[in-house]
Structure formats: structure tokens, C-alpha cells
Image: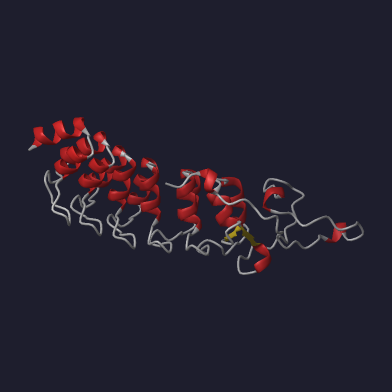
Amino acid sequence: MADKSQCPASSGRNTTVGNPPAYASRPPSPAPTYHTIDPASHDMPREVTVNARDEKSRLKDPGQAEFTLVHRAAALGDLKTVRHLLDGGSDELEVPTQSGSTPLIGACESGSIDVVKLLLEHGADITRRNKLGNTPLGTAASRGDVEIVRLLLDVGAERNPQLNIGWTPLLQAARGGHHQVVEVLLQRGADPSAITFTGQTALHIAVLNGKLEVVKTLLQNGATVAPLDNKRRTPLNLAAQHGHKDIVKLLKSWS
């Protein structure tokens, strides 16, 4: 699950700014970086370049992954700046980072539903994936953001997109213990029998991680009680093996 502490810091590289004629006789001011841009400021030059394909408008983190201004603002949940950039004509809406993350995925990582709504209003693609195969829905599900999950489902997000290793949003939510997200996904058509590359269902994953509430939610929404993984282990086998006594008791009562 992504959190705000993982958002890369700015390297301090500047955007490209054209100086208004009124200031031509004054010594030029330093071009504003992301941190110095105030979208509400009446002094902000209209010629701020926001084209992500201009290398000067990109920001880099220590890992050398590039972030456009829109992506960075979205990942920080900075609604005001995202709105300013998009309304100002930025074409960065679908520009990915080197990891393949779009601004919409970044907004889902930040947990900012207002930024997610704004990006969707501007036509952000809900089907775009990062290089791991994760979608906006998978990102929100892994974080446990039930409202963002609902919003993405409302606008038509695919229920069962798979990561490159086979994980669906339901499996991601189950691993994190996000029982409310699990319930919403199941009620909206997520496949409870979807499996990982090791053959484990969401019930296996919830049991393995000791997520009792997720186990309850899965069972109450029709998940198969005793599916077998690739090693022919049932969720009950895993619960007993890992000492999850409450889950063992629950599974036996359903069996």
C-alpha cells in the first residue's frame, strides 16, 4: 500500500517561465519550482510551461523516476495545483512516470478522492496500468480507500484486472485486511475465486495474513470455504499452520 511518505521529494529542478513584459526592466527572478508555485497567486506568470514533454518541466526522485508537475501534485493530493495545471492547458494527464504510474494512479496512492474526481472529470483513463500491471482500482483497493474504490467502479472500472503476477484488486484488499473494500468489490462483481500464481484465493490470502474480518466478509458473500491452492492446502490448513485460532474456529463453523 502506498502512502504519502513514499512520494518522492523534488530535486529542485525548475519549470520554464516566460517573464511578463511588465517585469522586463527588473532583474529576473528565479523560475518557480513546484514548491514555489501558488496557483491562486495573481502574480503567477501565465507563460509557465506545463508541457511534460519538455524535460525542464519534469522532476526526479532519488531513484531517478521522473514525475511531471501534474503527477507530483496528484500524488501529494494537491487539488489546487492539479486544477490550475489542467485548466491551464497541461497535456500531462496521461504522461506516466518511469514506473508507468499515471497521475490518476498517483492520486489513488495519495488517497485524495477530490483529486481523483478532478482527474476523471478531465478524462483520465481508468484502464491505464503501471509496469507492475496495477490499475487505479487495484491501487485504491490495496490502500483500503473504499470511497475511491466505489467511485472508480461507478465510472466503469474493470472489476478483476490482474497484476503481472496475477493479483486482482480483491486479492490486494484481502491481503491488507480491508474488509469494507472486499465487501464492495464482491457486491459489485469481483470474482471471489480469482487466484494468485500460487493458486491461492482471497480467502487463502486473508487467512494467511490473519485478517479475521476479511475472512468473515468473504464467507458471508459466497466465497468457497475449502478451495485448494497449488500445494493442495485449504484455508483451514493455513489457519491451523499459522496459529490463527479464531479463524480456525470460524472456518470449522462454516464447514
View extreme (right): residue: 25
Query: Going by the image, does 151 lie left or right of 221?
Result: right
Residue shown at 25% from the left, 43% from the top: 208
Position of the C terminus by quadrant = top left
Residue shown at 25% from the left, 41% from the top: 183
In this view, the residue in front, 4 or 28, is: 4
Q: Residue 81, how many percent across, how many down?
A: 61, 49
Quadrant location of residue 24?
A: bottom right
Residue 117 can be seen, yes or no = no
Question: Is residue 132 depicted above or below 142 in this figure?
Answer: below
Q: Residue 55, how many percent across, how many down?
A: 65, 68
Question: Is residue 112 depicted above or below 129 in this figure?
Answer: above
Query: Going by the image, does 162 lie left or right of 84?
Result: left
Q: Residue 8, how many percent across, how many down?
A: 58, 52
Query: Going by the image, does 92 lie left or right of 225?
Result: right
Residue shown at 40% from the left, 61% from the top: 132
Residue 126 can be seen, yes or no = yes
Q: Residue 59, how many percent across, how many down?
A: 63, 59
Number of numbered discs visible in the structure rendering: 0
Quadrant location of residue 66?
A: bottom right
In this view, the residue in front, 207 or 53, is: 207
Question: Is residue 87 depicted above or below 254 in this figure?
Answer: below
